[in-house]
């Protein structure tokens, strides 16, 4: 009887649970539709506009997201409008205009992707509120895209500007004044202008630290431009190459880092720069100048002498000249450090090398002992310094699949200040030719030589470079098993390096082509690749 009663109660429980589940609310289907514009006061695309307040209504609750970076006002207003509410969700947006509007001008407030639905975050894309202070709305359009001149990846959120070319126009306008019209690529590489007036315009692209920076600062911004003014109306689309200009030469006041070492920070090109000491120094005063690795800094090394408390310099190049005096206060010395640049394996194409933190002045080659198979002495070797004197090279005929041992005995290396090394020992080996692969490149579609062809790793570091002045098969030999990329530079001026552009001189950066395919190199394999430039 008890067992029968248990089953009856259990069955009733199942029915109750089932009914409860069937009756639970699910919340309905997910809202996947973005909000849409319903009305505004004044109405969108109003003419003879002279209001100070605007109210825009939507069909559902919205909120503003990342408005500072998304909102583009064209033409720009000196005093930004006040837009509310910024915190909560409402079915409207209020805009309070704080600027004196230009006469007979069409204004566009492009909210980009900043207006989103409150619940699911669906975006109302590229919503624009347009009005004119004149009696008609301008309606011309122009579009295009942004490309990076050097990098493989194009920046997002690039401002594209139009300056009216009229009787007051000069090229320096981009440094001093806001543009007539503004567009922005936002999270893409494309730009679109709408509601433009007929006329001629300078088209410039700027990428800076802020989306609202519309005056060009070469120190902090990249720039791109169309060489000739564009004329509206037009059916043309434009591609703008974005680049960082080389700054005019500027050498900063030197700083004392260690006793006997001054750092001259700089901007621009320091080739052929002269740094002449103008202090009354002894006739045997010694100094040496080299460049800091990976920094825009020149190191001025000098041997201190008795009674020295300051040094004065004349810094010059062409018309550029500065005079500096440095008070010498520190007694702290830097100790000589010799760093091995080779891992346990020396590549058959590489030269055994060491780096020094202080310029080197003397080498005693008799104190360099190189052994093959730990016992056979290598006598035919060339030991030399780099031009900057901060690298030491040991060149010798490398054998495949061989083990080596190097001993650098004490006092073999002397630095600028006379300090010498302690014992340095290094063991390394080589691989066989079969451990490497070779890459053969044929490049078609080159309009003009010379070109610079660079082999890159997957982080776009340059591994090998070939300069070519004619159509030929290029060979990158003895490559490690890995995946590689190729960059081709059109070396227009033939100076062996990529050159950036210059806005005032109307010089575009040298053209670069990135081969889209990744090239995989296998051991003991010859890889043939044909690159066809468009």
Image (cartoon, rainbow, N blue to C red):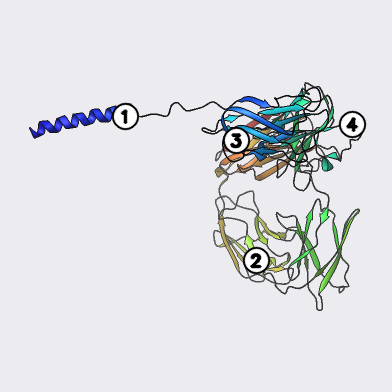
Percent coordinates x, y for residue 208 in the rendering: 72, 43
> Tag 2's secondary structure?
loop
Q: Nearer the viewer, mark 4 or mark 1?
A: 1
> Tag 3's secondary structure?
loop
Image marks 2 and 4: residues in contact by CB distance under 8 Å: no
Percent coordinates x, y for residue 218 in the rendering: 79, 46
The quarter of the rendered structure image containing the N terminus is top left
> Tag 1's secondary structure?
helix
Left or right: residue 283 compared with residue 68: right
Q: Residue 337 carries which label?
A: 2
Residue at 80 percent of width and 40 percent of height:
501
Relative to 121, does residue 496 appear above or below in the rendering?
below
Q: Earlier in the sequence, mark 2 or mark 3?
A: 2
The quarter of the rendered structure image containing the C terminus is top right
Characterize the local packing of mark 3: few (<14), some (14-19) or many (20 or more) Cα atoms within 10 angstroms: few
The image quarter containing residue 197 is: top right
Q: Residue furthest bottom?
A: 306
Q: Mark 1 points at which residue?
A: 21
Residue at 62 percent of width and 70 percent of height:
422
Image marks 3 and 1: residues in contact by CB distance under 8 Å: no
The residues bearing labels 4 and 3 have C-alpha atoms spaced at a distance of: 49 Å
Q: Which mark is residue 518?
A: 3
Residue at 91 percent of width and 35 percent of height:
168
The residues bearing labels 3 and 1 have C-alpha atoms spaced at a distance of: 55 Å
The image quarter containing residue 56 is: top right
Q: Which of marks 4 and 1 is nearer the N terminus?
A: 1
Q: Mark 4 points at which residue?
A: 166
Q: Earlier in the sequence, mark 4 or mark 3?
A: 4
Percent coordinates x, y for residue 242 in the rendering: 74, 38
Q: Is residue 500 visible?
A: yes
């Amino acid at each position: 009887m008890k067992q029968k009663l248990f089953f009856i109660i259990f069955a009733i429980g199942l029915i109750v649970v089932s009914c409860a589940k069937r009756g639970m609310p699910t919340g309905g289907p997910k809202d996947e539709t973005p909000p849409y514009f319903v009305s505004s006061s004044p109405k969108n695309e109003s003419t003879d506009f002279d209001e100070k307040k605007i109210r825009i209504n939507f069909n559902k609750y919205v909120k503003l997201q990342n408005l500072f970076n998304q909102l583009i006002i064209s033409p720009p207003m000196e005093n930004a409008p006040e837009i509310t509410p910024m915190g909560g969700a409402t079915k409207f947006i209020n805009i309070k205009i704080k600027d004196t509007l230009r006469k007979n001008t069409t204004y566009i407030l492009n909210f980009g992707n900043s207006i989103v639905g409150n619940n699911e975050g669906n975006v109302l894309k590229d919503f624009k509120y347009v009005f004119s202070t004149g009696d008609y709305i301008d309606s011309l359009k122009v579009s295009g895209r942004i490309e990076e001149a050097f990098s493989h990846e194009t920046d997002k959120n690039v401002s594209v500007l139009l300056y009216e070319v009229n009787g007051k126009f000069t090229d320096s306008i981009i440094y001093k004044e806001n543009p007539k019209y503004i567009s922005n690529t936002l999270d893409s590489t494309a730009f679109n202008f709408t509601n433009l007036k007929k006329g001629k315009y300078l088209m410039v692209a700027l990428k800076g630290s802020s989306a609202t920076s519309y005056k060009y600062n070469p120190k902090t911004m990249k720039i791109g431009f169309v060489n000739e003014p564009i004329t509206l109306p037009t059916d043309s689309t434009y591609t703008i190459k974005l680049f960082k200009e080389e700054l005019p030469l500027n050498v900063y006041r030197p700083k004392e880092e260690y006793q006997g070492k001054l750092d001259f920070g700089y901007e621009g090109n320091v080739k052929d720069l002269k740094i002449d000491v103008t202090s009354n120094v002894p006739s045997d005063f010694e100094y040496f100048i080299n460049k800091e690795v990976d920094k825009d800094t020149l190191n001025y090394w000098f041997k201190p002498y008795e009674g020295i408390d300051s040094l004065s310099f004349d810094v010059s190049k062409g018309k550029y000249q500065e005079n500096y005096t440095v008070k010498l206060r520190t007694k702290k010395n830097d100790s000589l450090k010799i760093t091995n640049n080779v891992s346990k394996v020396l590549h058959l194409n590489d030269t055994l090398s060491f780096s020094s933190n202080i310029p080197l002045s003397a080498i005693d080659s008799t104190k360099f002992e190189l052994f093959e198979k730990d016992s056979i002495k290598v006598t035919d070797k060339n030991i030399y310094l780099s031009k900057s004197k901060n690298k030491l090279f040991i060149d010798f005929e490398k054998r495949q699949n061989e083990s080596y041992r190097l001993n650098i005995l004490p006092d073999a290396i002397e630095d600028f200040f006379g300090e010498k090394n302690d014992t340095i020992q290094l063991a390394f080996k080589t691989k066989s030719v079969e451990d490497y692969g070779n890459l053969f490149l044929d490049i078609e579609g080159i309009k003009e030589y010379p070109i610079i062809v660079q082999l890159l790793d997957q982080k776009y570091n340059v591994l090998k470079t070939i300069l070519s002045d004619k159509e030929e098969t290029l060979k990158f030999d003895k490559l490690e098993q890995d995946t590689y990329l190729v960059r081709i530079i059109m070396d227009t001026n033939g100076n062996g390096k990529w050159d950036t552009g210059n806005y005032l001189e109307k010089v575009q950066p040298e053209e670069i082509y990135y081969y889209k395919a990744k090239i995989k190199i296998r051991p003991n394999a010859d890889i043939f690749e044909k690159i066809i430039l468009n």
